[in-house]
Amino acid sequence: MSVGAFFTRWIVQPAKDQFYRFGTAISWSALSSIGASRIARLTIIMPFVGYLIVFNSTLSEYFSTILPTDLAHEADDFWTVLYSRNLYFLYFGLLLFGAGVALFNVAAPPQIRRFPAVESYITAMDKIKTPNLVIGSFENIIGMYFSGLHGEERSPMFDARRIGFPSDVSGDLHRFVERLFLATEFSDEDFEPADDRLGSRFWTGSGYLMTDEVLDVAYSGRRAERVLHRALLDQAIAHPTDVFYLEHRALEYRRSAARIVVFLFYAIGSALLVFPSILTSILILKFW
């Protein structure tokens, strides 16, 4: 095995696998359990309150923590310095956590912020469904599919799996599009390529439907393919629940970079907030 093949197999591919698992685990719905809560929203203003506490000498002295006398004499200088900076850990923890909450409320799709659960989204959309609404949702799904594909192809971590449109969501979309296509008049396999140029491009020689080609028609809306495009939309209108389900699932993974940044803000901010408690526990256990 060459060095390049070894590097790809044991380093690059495992890194891509881990990146894909990480990227698909932090959906907007998962992040909403923190970002959409009222307590979390209060942390947006806490850094400003923390600024007044940290840099106001009177308040800083009031809120500061000191080691108990028996520990202060025994603790190393390193631990003493860290413990005396507890207020700073809390401040920067609130700062990063609040930044994550603010970014969540800006970047997360409004549909996910309002309806984190797909069931509640389908129920709400079903009450106001109209043909135009269903068509808009269907075209939104396809637009996210292609925009995610084109965006992630430029990333060094790109492979066949995409964190902006994961494999399970893509599989559901392809199966749904296949159902729509097979319900149209263009699904007839008994065609002559010379007589039916539109239909011939969607089937492989072994008889498999190329759903990517069908999706391209639904996405491009080219004039020459407008009849099939309209037929697909008509079929989508007849299946609003499937359309709303797929839209919610696709929206959960939209804006991959923003999702990762929000998660990192949450994680680092939470670690800084917890660190003073961990440090105190270490000191107590050390000098028990």
Image (cartoon, rainbow, N blue to C red):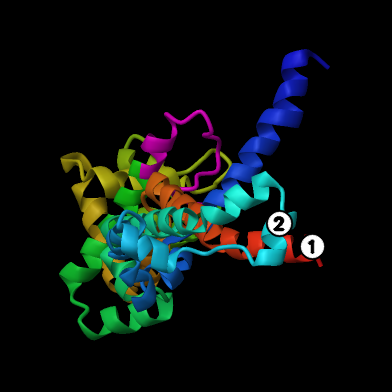
User: From which residue to which does the magenta span run?
Assistant: 148-166
At horizontal 42% and vertical 76% (from top left) the residue drawn is: 117
| Contact (Cβ within 8 Å) of mark 2 with mark 1 | no
- Identify the disc placed on residue 9: none
Examine the rendered structure and indicate whether residue 242 appears above or below residue 276: below
- Identify the disc placed on residue 73: 2
At horizontal 21% and vertical 46% (from top left) the residue drawn is: 221
Examine the rendered structure and indicate whether residue 134 appears above or below residue 106: below
Q: Earlier in the sequence, mark 2 or mark 1?
A: 2
Residue 233: image quadrant is bottom left
Q: Quadrant of the C terminus?
A: bottom right
Q: Observer-nearest residue: 169 or 36?
A: 36
Q: Say how many tags the image has.
A: 2
Side (left or right) of 282 relative to 130 = right
Q: Is residue 155 magenta?
A: yes
* Crowd band around label 1 with a 10 angstrom C-alpha radius: few (<14), some (14–19), many (20+): few
Q: Observer-nearest residue: 66 or 54?
A: 66
Q: In whole angstroms, how far apart are the C-alphas of marks 2 and 1?
A: 11 Å
Residue 240: image quadrant is bottom left
* Rendered location of residue 168, percent (x, y): 54, 57
Q: Observer-nearest residue: 215 or 113?
A: 113
Residue under label 1, please give it. 287
User: Would you say residue 8 is visible in this rendering?
Assistant: yes
User: Would you say residue 185 is visible in this rendering?
Assistant: no
| Badge 2 amino acid | His
At horizontal 34% and vertical 73% (from top left) the residue drawn is: 239
Examine the rendered structure and indicate whether residue 210 appears above or below residue 281: above
Q: Residue furthest top?
A: 2
